[in-house]
Image (cartoon, helix red, strand yellow):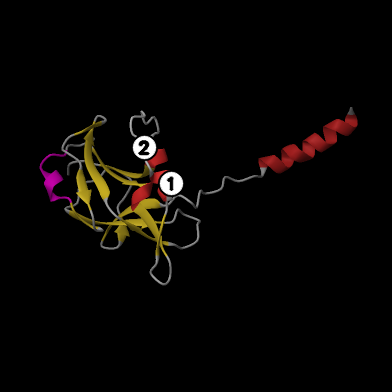
Amino acid sequence: MRNLIFPSLILLAAASKAMAQTDCARPEIQLLRNSQALPATAAALVTTATLRVAPAAGCPEQSYRFRHAEITLVRHGRPVLPIQLAEKPQLDLRPFQSHYQTGDQLRVFIAYQNIATVAPDGTLTPLLSAKDAKSRPGKLDLQTADSKGITYTLPLAKP
C-alpha cells in the first residue's frame, strides 16, 4: 500500500506545478489608438482606431492579415445598428458615436477563414484550410462564435 502512495504523491506534486499554456494557434485582436492599445475598462468611444491581429501574449511573433472584420455596437446582448464590415486596419467609428450609451460594447469579430499568416517573403497562408472553411448547406451550425473566429469586446461609457 505504501508503495502506491509515494508515486501518487510525486505525480500530484508535479501536476500542481503545471502551468496553463497559451493557444498560439489562435491570434488575438487589438484595437490601437496612437499605437497604444485601448484600455479594457469602460471608456468613451474613440472616433478612429487601428485594428491589428497579433499573436497571443507569450507566443512567437507572427504577422497576420485579415480580409474583413465585423464591427458591431451591442446593447444588452443585441446589436444597436447593423454590422459594419471593415476591410482595412484603419477603423472609422464615427457612425457609432451618436448611438452608443454607457454600458454598451463595441465588438469586433474576425472569422478564422478571413485571417491569413504572412510569411517573411509576403506569402499569405490561410489560418483555416479551405476544407475546414467550407460550410455545410442545409445543416444547422451549432458552433459558438469563439470556435468560428476571434472576438474583441470594448466596454463603453459616455464621458
Q: Is residue 120 above or below residue 55?
A: below
Residue under pointer 1: 131
Q: Position of residue 156 (x, y in %)?
A: 24, 41
SS for dot 1? helix
Q: Position of residue 42 (x, y in %)?
A: 27, 42
Residue that protrudes farthest toward the left in the picture? 98
Q: Nearer the viewer, residue 110 or 33?
A: 110
Residue that appears at 89% across and 33% down = 3
Image quarter of the N terminus: top right
Residue that appears at 36% across and 37% down = 145
Residue that appears at 40% across and 67% down = 123
In the image, which residues are magenta? 93-100
The part of the image, by quadrant, that contains residue 88 is bottom left
Q: Which mark identifies residue 145?
A: 2
User: Counting other residues with Cα less than 10 Å from the Cα at mark 2, is it few (<14), some (14-19), or many (20 or more)?
Assistant: few
Label 2 is placed on what type of residue?
Answer: Ala
Residue 105 among magenta residues: no
SS for dot 2? helix
Q: Nearer the viewer, residue 105 or 41?
A: 105
Proximity of marks 1 and 2: CB atoms separated by less than 8 Å: no
Of the two numbered discs 1 and 2 on the same chain, state the one appearing first in sequence: 1
Give the CA separation, mark 1 to mark 2.
19 Å
